[in-house]
Amino acid sequence: MERPRAQAKALPGGTACDGPCGPVTFHADVTRASPKKTAVVPDAGTDGPPLASFEGLGLSADVLSAVRDAGYGEPTPIQREAIPIILAGRDVMGLAQTGTGKTAAFTLPIAERLLGGPRRLRALVLTPTRELCQQVEGSFRKYARHTRLGVASVYGGVGMEPQERALRDGVDVVVATPGRLIDHLERGNVSFEWLEVLVLDEADRMLDMGFAPQINRLVGAMPRYRQTLLFSATMPPEVEVLARKYLRRPHVVEVTRRASAATTVRHAVYPVPRSRKSALLVELLKQPEMDSVLVFTRMKVGADRVVRDLEHAGISATALHADKRQAQRDQALAEFREGRIRVLVATDIAQRGLDISGISHVINYDVPAQVEDYVHRIGRTGRAAQTGDAYTFMAPDEIATVRLIERVIGQEIERVSVPGFDFG
Ligand code: ADP
Ligand code: MG
Protein backbone atom coordinates (compact mmCIF):
# COMPACT_ATOMS: atom_id res chain seq x y z
CA MET A 1 0.00 0.00 0.00
CA GLU A 2 1.24 3.43 -0.81
CA ARG A 3 2.00 5.45 2.28
CA PRO A 4 0.19 8.72 2.59
CA ARG A 5 2.50 11.68 2.76
CA ALA A 6 2.35 14.42 5.29
CA GLN A 7 3.09 17.98 4.56
CA ALA A 8 2.99 21.05 6.70
CA LYS A 9 2.13 24.54 5.60
CA ALA A 10 0.85 27.77 7.02
CA LEU A 11 -2.71 28.93 6.68
CA PRO A 12 -2.81 31.85 4.30
CA GLY A 13 -2.28 34.88 6.48
CA GLY A 14 -0.90 32.85 9.36
CA THR A 15 2.70 32.26 10.26
CA ALA A 16 4.09 28.80 10.41
CA CYS A 17 6.17 27.84 13.36
CA ASP A 18 6.81 31.27 14.79
CA GLY A 19 6.64 30.07 18.35
CA PRO A 20 8.34 27.21 20.08
CA CYS A 21 7.04 24.38 17.94
CA GLY A 22 8.96 21.48 19.31
CA PRO A 23 10.68 18.89 17.21
CA VAL A 24 8.60 19.49 14.10
CA THR A 25 9.94 17.59 11.16
CA PHE A 26 9.18 18.06 7.52
CA HIS A 27 9.57 15.49 4.85
CA ALA A 28 11.82 16.09 1.93
CA ASP A 29 8.82 16.11 -0.37
CA VAL A 30 7.11 19.06 1.27
CA THR A 31 5.63 21.01 -1.58
CA ARG A 32 3.54 23.64 0.09
CA ALA A 33 5.64 24.45 3.12
CA SER A 34 5.70 28.03 4.22
CA PRO A 35 8.86 29.75 3.03
CA LYS A 36 9.42 30.90 6.60
CA LYS A 37 11.63 28.91 8.93
CA THR A 38 10.74 25.50 7.60
CA ALA A 39 13.57 23.10 7.93
CA VAL A 40 13.77 20.14 5.63
CA VAL A 41 15.30 17.27 7.48
CA PRO A 42 16.19 13.88 6.11
CA ASP A 43 13.77 11.12 7.02
CA ALA A 44 16.29 9.35 9.25
CA GLY A 45 17.18 11.49 12.25
CA THR A 46 20.81 11.96 13.12
CA ASP A 47 20.46 11.21 16.80
CA GLY A 48 17.82 9.78 19.08
CA PRO A 49 15.31 7.16 18.02
CA PRO A 50 14.33 6.92 14.35
CA LEU A 51 11.66 9.38 13.25
CA ALA A 52 9.30 6.58 12.34
CA SER A 53 8.72 5.56 15.93
CA PHE A 54 6.42 6.67 18.71
CA GLU A 55 9.40 6.97 21.05
CA GLY A 56 10.71 10.07 19.31
CA LEU A 57 7.53 12.10 19.63
CA GLY A 58 7.84 13.30 23.21
CA LEU A 59 5.34 10.97 24.88
CA SER A 60 6.01 9.62 28.36
CA ALA A 61 6.47 5.98 29.33
CA ASP A 62 2.86 5.63 30.58
CA VAL A 63 1.36 6.73 27.30
CA LEU A 64 3.93 4.84 25.23
CA SER A 65 3.12 1.60 26.97
CA ALA A 66 -0.57 2.09 26.13
CA VAL A 67 0.43 2.64 22.50
CA ARG A 68 2.35 -0.61 22.61
CA ASP A 69 -0.66 -2.35 24.14
CA ALA A 70 -2.72 -1.07 21.20
CA GLY A 71 -0.30 -2.89 18.94
CA TYR A 72 0.76 0.13 16.91
CA GLY A 73 4.21 -0.28 15.41
CA GLU A 74 4.87 3.19 14.11
CA PRO A 75 2.97 6.46 14.00
CA THR A 76 0.94 7.30 10.91
CA PRO A 77 2.05 10.44 9.03
CA ILE A 78 -0.52 12.68 10.69
CA GLN A 79 0.44 11.33 14.11
CA ARG A 80 4.12 11.91 13.42
CA GLU A 81 3.51 15.49 12.39
CA ALA A 82 0.78 16.52 14.79
CA ILE A 83 1.77 14.93 18.11
CA PRO A 84 4.91 17.04 18.77
CA ILE A 85 3.12 20.23 17.75
CA ILE A 86 0.16 19.50 20.00
CA LEU A 87 2.49 18.66 22.88
CA ALA A 88 4.12 22.04 22.33
CA GLY A 89 0.75 23.69 22.91
CA ARG A 90 0.14 25.01 19.41
CA ASP A 91 -3.19 25.11 17.64
CA VAL A 92 -3.36 22.53 14.90
CA MET A 93 -5.52 22.05 11.90
CA GLY A 94 -5.27 18.44 10.75
CA LEU A 95 -6.48 17.62 7.28
CA ALA A 96 -6.49 13.95 6.48
CA GLN A 97 -8.83 11.39 5.13
CA THR A 98 -10.74 8.89 7.13
CA GLY A 99 -8.60 6.05 8.41
CA THR A 100 -5.37 7.98 8.72
CA GLY A 101 -5.25 7.79 12.52
CA LYS A 102 -6.48 11.25 13.47
CA THR A 103 -8.02 10.07 16.74
CA ALA A 104 -4.72 8.96 18.24
CA ALA A 105 -3.07 12.05 16.74
CA PHE A 106 -5.00 14.16 19.25
CA THR A 107 -5.92 11.75 22.07
CA LEU A 108 -2.30 10.70 22.71
CA PRO A 109 -0.82 14.18 23.19
CA ILE A 110 -3.89 15.35 25.14
CA ALA A 111 -3.65 12.36 27.49
CA GLU A 112 0.03 13.23 27.87
CA ARG A 113 -0.65 16.88 28.65
CA LEU A 114 -3.29 16.11 31.24
CA LEU A 115 -1.19 13.59 33.19
CA GLY A 116 -1.04 14.36 36.83
CA GLY A 117 -3.04 17.59 36.84
CA PRO A 118 -6.02 18.30 39.09
CA ARG A 119 -9.27 16.59 38.13
CA ARG A 120 -11.41 19.13 36.38
CA LEU A 121 -12.67 19.51 32.86
CA ARG A 122 -9.52 20.38 30.91
CA ALA A 123 -10.12 18.84 27.50
CA LEU A 124 -13.26 18.77 25.40
CA VAL A 125 -13.78 16.96 22.11
CA LEU A 126 -16.79 17.85 19.98
CA THR A 127 -17.87 15.23 17.45
CA PRO A 128 -20.84 15.06 15.08
CA THR A 129 -22.41 11.75 16.13
CA ARG A 130 -23.03 9.61 19.17
CA GLU A 131 -21.17 6.68 17.69
CA LEU A 132 -18.11 8.79 17.12
CA CYS A 133 -18.35 10.10 20.69
CA GLN A 134 -18.21 6.59 22.02
CA GLN A 135 -15.32 5.76 19.78
CA VAL A 136 -13.24 8.77 20.83
CA GLU A 137 -14.09 8.11 24.47
CA GLY A 138 -12.87 4.54 23.99
CA SER A 139 -9.69 5.85 22.46
CA PHE A 140 -9.01 8.07 25.49
CA ARG A 141 -9.65 5.17 27.82
CA LYS A 142 -7.27 3.01 25.80
CA TYR A 143 -4.41 5.51 25.76
CA ALA A 144 -4.94 6.69 29.32
CA ARG A 145 -5.20 3.20 30.78
CA HIS A 146 -1.97 3.56 32.73
CA THR A 147 -3.03 6.94 34.07
CA ARG A 148 -5.93 8.12 36.19
CA LEU A 149 -7.66 10.37 33.68
CA GLY A 150 -11.43 10.58 34.02
CA VAL A 151 -13.35 10.52 30.72
CA ALA A 152 -17.06 10.99 30.07
CA SER A 153 -19.07 11.08 26.91
CA VAL A 154 -22.20 13.11 26.45
CA TYR A 155 -24.67 12.69 23.58
CA GLY A 156 -28.36 12.80 22.87
CA GLY A 157 -30.86 9.97 22.66
CA VAL A 158 -30.17 8.64 26.14
CA GLY A 159 -31.07 9.89 29.62
CA MET A 160 -29.47 13.06 30.99
CA GLU A 161 -29.02 11.76 34.55
CA PRO A 162 -26.16 9.28 34.18
CA GLN A 163 -24.25 11.85 32.14
CA GLU A 164 -25.02 14.53 34.70
CA ARG A 165 -23.70 12.31 37.47
CA ALA A 166 -20.52 11.54 35.53
CA LEU A 167 -19.94 15.23 34.87
CA ARG A 168 -20.59 16.23 38.47
CA ASP A 169 -18.33 13.48 39.81
CA GLY A 170 -15.48 15.22 38.03
CA VAL A 171 -13.77 14.38 34.77
CA ASP A 172 -10.67 15.49 32.91
CA VAL A 173 -11.98 14.88 29.42
CA VAL A 174 -15.46 15.20 27.93
CA VAL A 175 -16.34 13.90 24.48
CA ALA A 176 -19.66 15.32 23.34
CA THR A 177 -22.07 16.04 20.55
CA PRO A 178 -22.83 19.78 20.50
CA GLY A 179 -26.59 19.73 21.18
CA ARG A 180 -26.53 17.61 24.30
CA LEU A 181 -23.54 19.45 25.69
CA ILE A 182 -25.50 22.72 25.45
CA ASP A 183 -28.29 21.10 27.48
CA HIS A 184 -25.79 20.24 30.21
CA LEU A 185 -24.18 23.66 30.03
CA GLU A 186 -27.53 25.38 30.44
CA ARG A 187 -28.41 23.25 33.45
CA GLY A 188 -25.09 24.09 35.05
CA ASN A 189 -23.90 20.47 34.95
CA VAL A 190 -20.67 21.43 33.30
CA SER A 191 -18.33 24.40 33.34
CA PHE A 192 -15.62 25.32 30.88
CA GLU A 193 -13.77 27.50 33.35
CA TRP A 194 -10.68 25.27 33.40
CA LEU A 195 -10.76 24.15 29.80
CA GLU A 196 -7.31 24.00 28.23
CA VAL A 197 -7.88 22.09 25.00
CA LEU A 198 -10.79 22.06 22.58
CA VAL A 199 -10.92 19.55 19.74
CA LEU A 200 -13.30 19.89 16.82
CA ASP A 201 -13.27 16.41 15.33
CA GLU A 202 -14.77 15.77 11.89
CA ALA A 203 -15.33 19.50 11.53
CA ASP A 204 -16.61 19.22 7.98
CA ARG A 205 -19.19 16.71 9.08
CA MET A 206 -20.33 18.83 12.02
CA LEU A 207 -20.90 21.76 9.68
CA ASP A 208 -22.72 19.54 7.17
CA MET A 209 -25.02 18.55 9.99
CA GLY A 210 -25.78 22.17 10.79
CA PHE A 211 -23.93 22.38 14.10
CA ALA A 212 -22.30 25.76 13.43
CA PRO A 213 -24.63 27.71 15.79
CA GLN A 214 -24.18 25.16 18.57
CA ILE A 215 -20.40 25.21 18.21
CA ASN A 216 -20.53 28.97 18.31
CA ARG A 217 -22.61 28.97 21.47
CA LEU A 218 -20.26 26.50 23.19
CA VAL A 219 -17.04 28.22 22.19
CA GLY A 220 -18.53 31.49 23.46
CA ALA A 221 -18.60 29.94 26.94
CA MET A 222 -14.94 28.86 26.82
CA PRO A 223 -11.80 30.64 27.94
CA ARG A 224 -10.13 32.60 25.16
CA TYR A 225 -6.72 31.27 26.05
CA ARG A 226 -6.93 27.66 25.17
CA GLN A 227 -5.47 25.28 22.62
CA THR A 228 -7.77 24.47 19.75
CA LEU A 229 -7.35 21.53 17.42
CA LEU A 230 -9.47 21.03 14.34
CA PHE A 231 -9.60 17.82 12.34
CA SER A 232 -11.34 17.43 9.05
CA ALA A 233 -11.26 15.11 6.07
CA THR A 234 -12.05 17.90 3.66
CA MET A 235 -11.45 21.62 3.58
CA PRO A 236 -14.52 23.37 2.18
CA PRO A 237 -14.68 27.17 2.69
CA GLU A 238 -16.97 26.75 5.73
CA VAL A 239 -14.28 24.78 7.56
CA GLU A 240 -11.73 27.44 6.71
CA VAL A 241 -14.07 30.06 8.17
CA LEU A 242 -14.43 27.98 11.33
CA ALA A 243 -10.65 27.64 11.58
CA ARG A 244 -10.10 31.37 11.18
CA LYS A 245 -12.65 32.07 13.87
CA TYR A 246 -11.49 29.68 16.53
CA LEU A 247 -7.86 28.80 15.93
CA ARG A 248 -4.89 31.02 16.68
CA ARG A 249 -2.13 30.86 14.09
CA PRO A 250 -2.76 27.20 13.55
CA HIS A 251 -0.13 24.86 12.31
CA VAL A 252 -1.64 23.04 9.37
CA VAL A 253 -0.81 19.38 8.99
CA GLU A 254 -2.07 17.92 5.79
CA VAL A 255 -1.84 14.35 4.67
CA THR A 256 -2.35 13.75 1.01
CA ARG A 257 -2.50 10.57 -0.92
CA ARG A 258 -1.69 10.25 -4.55
CA ALA A 259 -4.95 8.49 -5.28
CA SER A 260 -7.65 10.04 -3.19
CA ALA A 261 -9.55 6.82 -2.57
CA ALA A 262 -7.90 4.24 -0.32
CA THR A 263 -5.50 2.30 -2.49
CA THR A 264 -6.06 -1.12 -1.00
CA VAL A 265 -9.67 -1.14 -2.09
CA ARG A 266 -10.85 -2.78 -5.27
CA HIS A 267 -13.66 -0.76 -6.80
CA ALA A 268 -16.37 -2.11 -9.05
CA VAL A 269 -19.58 -0.74 -10.49
CA TYR A 270 -22.50 -3.06 -11.11
CA PRO A 271 -24.96 -1.76 -13.69
CA VAL A 272 -28.40 -2.87 -12.50
CA PRO A 273 -31.96 -1.60 -12.81
CA ARG A 274 -33.20 -0.03 -9.58
CA SER A 275 -35.90 -2.68 -9.14
CA ARG A 276 -33.30 -5.48 -9.26
CA LYS A 277 -30.83 -4.06 -6.73
CA SER A 278 -31.97 -6.20 -3.79
CA ALA A 279 -31.90 -9.32 -5.95
CA LEU A 280 -28.35 -8.50 -7.03
CA LEU A 281 -27.33 -7.98 -3.41
CA VAL A 282 -28.74 -11.39 -2.50
CA GLU A 283 -26.85 -12.87 -5.44
CA LEU A 284 -23.54 -11.31 -4.38
CA LEU A 285 -24.02 -12.37 -0.78
CA LYS A 286 -23.90 -15.98 -1.93
CA GLN A 287 -20.13 -15.61 -1.91
CA PRO A 288 -18.89 -16.79 1.49
CA GLU A 289 -15.93 -14.39 1.44
CA MET A 290 -18.41 -11.54 1.85
CA ASP A 291 -18.38 -12.08 5.57
CA SER A 292 -18.67 -8.53 6.84
CA VAL A 293 -20.62 -6.26 4.58
CA LEU A 294 -21.63 -2.67 5.09
CA VAL A 295 -24.42 -1.59 2.74
CA PHE A 296 -25.19 2.09 2.27
CA THR A 297 -28.58 3.37 1.20
CA ARG A 298 -29.57 6.96 0.67
CA MET A 299 -32.70 6.94 2.82
CA LYS A 300 -33.83 5.41 6.10
CA VAL A 301 -36.82 3.74 4.43
CA GLY A 302 -34.42 2.38 1.86
CA ALA A 303 -32.30 0.80 4.59
CA ASP A 304 -35.34 -0.80 6.19
CA ARG A 305 -36.52 -2.09 2.84
CA VAL A 306 -33.14 -3.67 2.02
CA VAL A 307 -33.15 -5.42 5.40
CA ARG A 308 -36.64 -6.77 4.66
CA ASP A 309 -35.61 -7.93 1.19
CA LEU A 310 -32.56 -9.72 2.57
CA GLU A 311 -34.57 -11.37 5.31
CA HIS A 312 -37.05 -12.57 2.71
CA ALA A 313 -34.11 -14.29 1.04
CA GLY A 314 -33.05 -15.85 4.33
CA ILE A 315 -30.11 -13.52 4.98
CA SER A 316 -30.16 -11.82 8.33
CA ALA A 317 -29.26 -8.15 8.30
CA THR A 318 -29.57 -5.16 10.58
CA ALA A 319 -30.32 -1.51 9.84
CA LEU A 320 -28.44 1.39 11.40
CA HIS A 321 -30.01 4.82 11.07
CA ALA A 322 -31.22 7.79 13.06
CA ASP A 323 -34.74 6.45 13.65
CA LYS A 324 -33.39 3.57 15.68
CA ARG A 325 -33.18 3.98 19.40
CA GLN A 326 -29.70 4.58 20.73
CA ALA A 327 -29.58 1.19 22.43
CA GLN A 328 -30.47 -0.52 19.17
CA ARG A 329 -27.78 1.40 17.30
CA ASP A 330 -25.16 0.55 19.91
CA GLN A 331 -26.12 -3.08 19.84
CA ALA A 332 -26.08 -3.28 16.03
CA LEU A 333 -22.62 -1.75 15.87
CA ALA A 334 -21.27 -3.94 18.64
CA GLU A 335 -22.57 -7.09 16.98
CA PHE A 336 -21.23 -6.05 13.59
CA ARG A 337 -17.82 -5.37 15.14
CA GLU A 338 -17.79 -8.75 16.82
CA GLY A 339 -18.70 -10.43 13.56
CA ARG A 340 -22.09 -11.60 14.80
CA ILE A 341 -23.92 -9.51 12.19
CA ARG A 342 -22.82 -10.21 8.66
CA VAL A 343 -24.70 -7.45 6.90
CA LEU A 344 -25.23 -3.97 8.30
CA VAL A 345 -27.41 -1.63 6.25
CA ALA A 346 -26.73 1.99 7.08
CA THR A 347 -27.64 5.47 6.01
CA ASP A 348 -25.39 8.48 6.06
CA ILE A 349 -25.10 8.34 9.85
CA ALA A 350 -22.53 5.53 9.77
CA GLN A 351 -20.67 7.06 6.95
CA ARG A 352 -17.80 8.99 8.34
CA GLY A 353 -15.49 8.77 11.25
CA LEU A 354 -16.64 5.43 12.52
CA ASP A 355 -13.89 2.93 12.79
CA ILE A 356 -15.36 -0.37 11.83
CA SER A 357 -12.24 -2.37 11.23
CA GLY A 358 -12.33 -5.68 9.46
CA ILE A 359 -15.01 -4.86 6.96
CA SER A 360 -14.63 -7.05 3.90
CA HIS A 361 -17.02 -5.19 1.65
CA VAL A 362 -18.74 -1.87 1.26
CA ILE A 363 -21.71 -1.79 -1.05
CA ASN A 364 -23.21 1.44 -2.27
CA TYR A 365 -26.75 0.26 -2.86
CA ASP A 366 -27.48 3.76 -4.08
CA VAL A 367 -24.81 5.84 -5.76
CA PRO A 368 -23.86 8.51 -3.22
CA ALA A 369 -25.18 11.91 -4.25
CA GLN A 370 -21.96 13.66 -3.24
CA VAL A 371 -18.66 12.59 -4.70
CA GLU A 372 -16.96 13.18 -1.37
CA ASP A 373 -19.31 10.72 0.24
CA TYR A 374 -18.02 8.06 -2.10
CA VAL A 375 -14.46 8.66 -0.97
CA HIS A 376 -15.50 8.67 2.69
CA ARG A 377 -17.42 5.47 2.37
CA ILE A 378 -14.62 3.74 0.62
CA GLY A 379 -12.47 4.99 3.48
CA ARG A 380 -14.44 2.62 5.68
CA THR A 381 -12.60 -0.35 4.23
CA GLY A 382 -8.93 -0.55 3.41
CA ARG A 383 -8.00 1.09 6.71
CA ALA A 384 -4.71 0.29 8.37
CA ALA A 385 -3.47 -1.90 5.53
CA GLN A 386 -6.50 -4.09 5.32
CA THR A 387 -8.02 -4.81 1.99
CA GLY A 388 -11.62 -4.44 1.09
CA ASP A 389 -13.86 -4.37 -1.90
CA ALA A 390 -16.18 -1.52 -2.71
CA TYR A 391 -19.11 -2.21 -5.00
CA THR A 392 -21.49 0.39 -6.31
CA PHE A 393 -24.89 -0.50 -7.73
CA MET A 394 -25.63 1.83 -10.62
CA ALA A 395 -29.14 2.25 -12.00
CA PRO A 396 -29.52 3.93 -15.41
CA ASP A 397 -30.32 7.31 -13.82
CA GLU A 398 -27.14 7.11 -11.72
CA ILE A 399 -24.66 6.80 -14.60
CA ALA A 400 -23.86 10.50 -14.68
CA THR A 401 -23.07 10.56 -10.96
CA VAL A 402 -20.73 7.59 -11.30
CA ARG A 403 -18.92 9.36 -14.16
CA LEU A 404 -18.49 12.41 -11.95
CA ILE A 405 -17.08 10.26 -9.16
CA GLU A 406 -14.60 8.74 -11.58
CA ARG A 407 -13.48 12.16 -12.72
CA VAL A 408 -12.94 13.34 -9.18
CA ILE A 409 -11.06 10.29 -7.94
CA GLY A 410 -9.09 10.27 -11.18
CA GLN A 411 -9.73 6.62 -11.75
CA GLU A 412 -12.02 4.64 -13.99
CA ILE A 413 -14.02 2.11 -12.04
CA GLU A 414 -14.34 -1.36 -13.48
CA ARG A 415 -17.84 -2.34 -14.66
CA VAL A 416 -18.94 -5.79 -13.61
CA SER A 417 -21.92 -7.20 -15.36
CA VAL A 418 -23.77 -10.03 -13.67
CA PRO A 419 -25.79 -12.03 -16.21
CA GLY A 420 -29.48 -11.50 -15.67
CA PHE A 421 -29.00 -8.25 -13.74
CA ASP A 422 -27.31 -5.83 -16.12
CA PHE A 423 -29.58 -3.28 -17.78
CA GLY A 424 -27.23 -2.84 -20.72
P1 ADP B 1 -9.46 8.77 11.39
O1 ADP B 1 -9.98 9.51 12.58
O2 ADP B 1 -8.35 9.46 10.70
O3 ADP B 1 -10.57 8.40 10.44
P2 ADP B 1 -8.91 6.65 13.25
O4 ADP B 1 -8.25 7.45 14.26
O5 ADP B 1 -10.33 6.24 13.50
O6 ADP B 1 -8.85 7.38 11.84
O7 ADP B 1 -7.97 5.38 12.97
C1 ADP B 1 -8.26 4.44 11.97
C2 ADP B 1 -7.76 3.05 12.34
O8 ADP B 1 -6.33 3.01 12.33
C3 ADP B 1 -8.17 2.60 13.72
O9 ADP B 1 -8.54 1.24 13.64
C4 ADP B 1 -6.93 2.75 14.56
O10 ADP B 1 -6.91 1.84 15.64
C5 ADP B 1 -5.85 2.47 13.54
N1 ADP B 1 -4.58 3.14 13.86
C6 ADP B 1 -4.42 4.40 14.30
N2 ADP B 1 -3.11 4.70 14.47
C7 ADP B 1 -2.43 3.59 14.10
C8 ADP B 1 -1.04 3.27 14.05
N3 ADP B 1 -0.11 4.15 14.39
N4 ADP B 1 -0.71 2.04 13.62
C9 ADP B 1 -1.66 1.14 13.26
N5 ADP B 1 -2.99 1.38 13.30
C10 ADP B 1 -3.37 2.59 13.71
MG1 MG C 1 -11.72 10.37 13.08
Image (tube, rainbow, N blue to C red):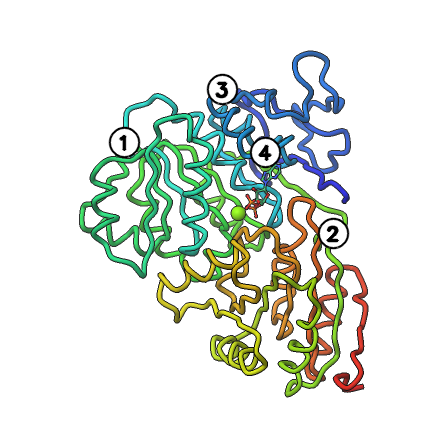
* Element at label 3: loop
Q: Amino acid at mark 3?
A: Ser
> Which residue is labeled 1 in the image?
120
Mark-to-mark CA distance, 3 and 4? 17 Å
- Name the front one of labels 3 and 4: 4
Q: Who comes first in sequence, dot 1 or dot 2?
A: 1
**Residue 379 screen position, x and y as percent:** 63, 55
Spatial distance from mark 4 to mark 2, Cα to Cα?
21 Å
Q: Choose between 67 and 284: the one closer to the eye.
A: 284
Instruction: Residue under label 4, please give it.
Output: 71
Which three-letter amino acid code belongs to the residue tagged 1?
Arg
| SS for callout 2 | loop
Q: Residue furthest top?
A: 47
Tag 3 residue: 60
The label on residue 382 is: none
Q: Residues within 10 Å of mark 2 (few under 14, many from 20)?
A: some
Look at the picture and state if 55 lies above or below 255. Answer: above
- Residue topped by disc 2: 264
